[in-house]
Image (cartoon, rainbow, N blue to C red):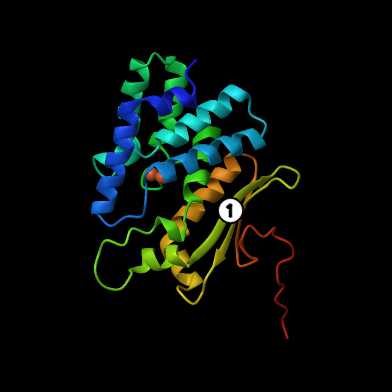
């Protein structure tokens, strides 16, 4: 059975990951190269492992994370679906079982909020891993002039960590945000849709999504008592 090691040794995949990053750099997007896909590979696998999936599924998750952004070498738009088609052909050429290939490519095709939805546990884990990778080191500073809102928000993220707590049934994205660089409202302005997708993804994994910024829980409160309006 193919492992992440086999996939990482595939020169075609290495080239496609580099090309995807080149394309996005030219268009002013944040870093999507080997660092990003390695992070997402580890994180997707870790989520699946923490939730108790078997070792083969954890390996499949690591492969999916590594290959998820290849579609960006053609265009950002619909890169989940285009990437899934490219990965499908390459993995079949490498002799991977059709059932495993389909599991991987369905997750890749659905990882972006543009048209995707967390339709399986693997897709949900990939979405959470991918969206948790926002960090100041990802900013490509190619364009002249002051940083735009995406750059400012990413530059403001000093630290970010996503972790599963099986005891409490939560998946937490914990961010340290430098408010001298950007406002937390800017974060929500550009990432609200993503955070909604993370909530849906966590639900597919039978968990509650928590977003914590500078130790404040901004999403994920358990509904307790609603304020009761009384007539005077
Ligand atoms: Fe993507
Ligand atoms: Fe990504």
Report whether 90 appears left or right of 40.
left
For label 1, being within 8 Å of ligand 2 is answered no
In this rendered view, identify the residue nearer to me: 181 or 10. 10
Q: Position of residue 31 (x, y in %)?
A: 37, 51
- At 55% from the left and 60% from the top, the residue drawn is 159
128 in relation to 183, above or below = above
Q: Is residue 78 visible?
A: no
- At 52% from the left and 31% from the top, the residue drawn is 61
Report whether 145 appears left or right of 162.
left
- At 43% from the left and 65% from the top, the residue drawn is 155
Q: Position of residue 214 (x, y in %)?
A: 61, 67
> Badge 1: few (under 14), some or many (20 or more) residues near its Cα, within 10 Å?
some
Q: Position of residue 21 (x, y in %)?
A: 31, 45
Q: Quadrant of residue 206?
A: top right
In this rendered view, identify the residue nearer to me: 188 or 13. 13
Q: Which residue is mark 1?
A: 161
- At 28% from the left and 52% from the top, the residue drawn is 25
Q: Is residue 202 visible?
A: yes
Name the element at disc 1. strand
């Amino acid at each position: 059975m193919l492992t992440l090691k086999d996939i990482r040794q595939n020169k075609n995949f290495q080239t496609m990951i580099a090309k995807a990053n080149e394309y996005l750099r030219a268009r002013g997007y944040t870093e999507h190269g080997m660092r990003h896909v390695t992070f997402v590979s580890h994180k997707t696998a870790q989520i699946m492992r923490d939730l108790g999936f078997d070792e083969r599924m954890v390996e499949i998750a690591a492969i999916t994370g590594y290959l998820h952004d290849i579609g960006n070498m053609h265009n950002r738009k619909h890169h989940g679906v285009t990437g899934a088609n490219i990965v499908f052909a390459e993995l079949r050429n490498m002799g991977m079982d059709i059932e495993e290939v389909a599991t991987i490519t369905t997750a890749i095709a659905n990882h972006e909020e543009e048209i995707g939805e967390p339709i399986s546990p693997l897709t949900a884990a990939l979405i959470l891993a991918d969206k948790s990778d926002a960090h100041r080191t990802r900013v490509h500073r190619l364009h002249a002039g002051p940083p735009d809102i995406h750059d400012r928000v990413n530059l403001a993220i000093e630290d970010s960590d996503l972790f599963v707590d099986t005891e409490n049934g939560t998946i937490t994205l914990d961010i340290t945000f430098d408010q001298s660089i950007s406002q937390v409202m800017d974060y929500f302005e550009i990432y609200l849709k993503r955070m909604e997708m993370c909530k849906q993804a966590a639900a597919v994994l039978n968990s509650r999504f928590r977003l914590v910024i500078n130790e404040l829980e901004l999403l994920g409160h358990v509904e307790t008592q609603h304020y009761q309006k009384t007539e005077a």
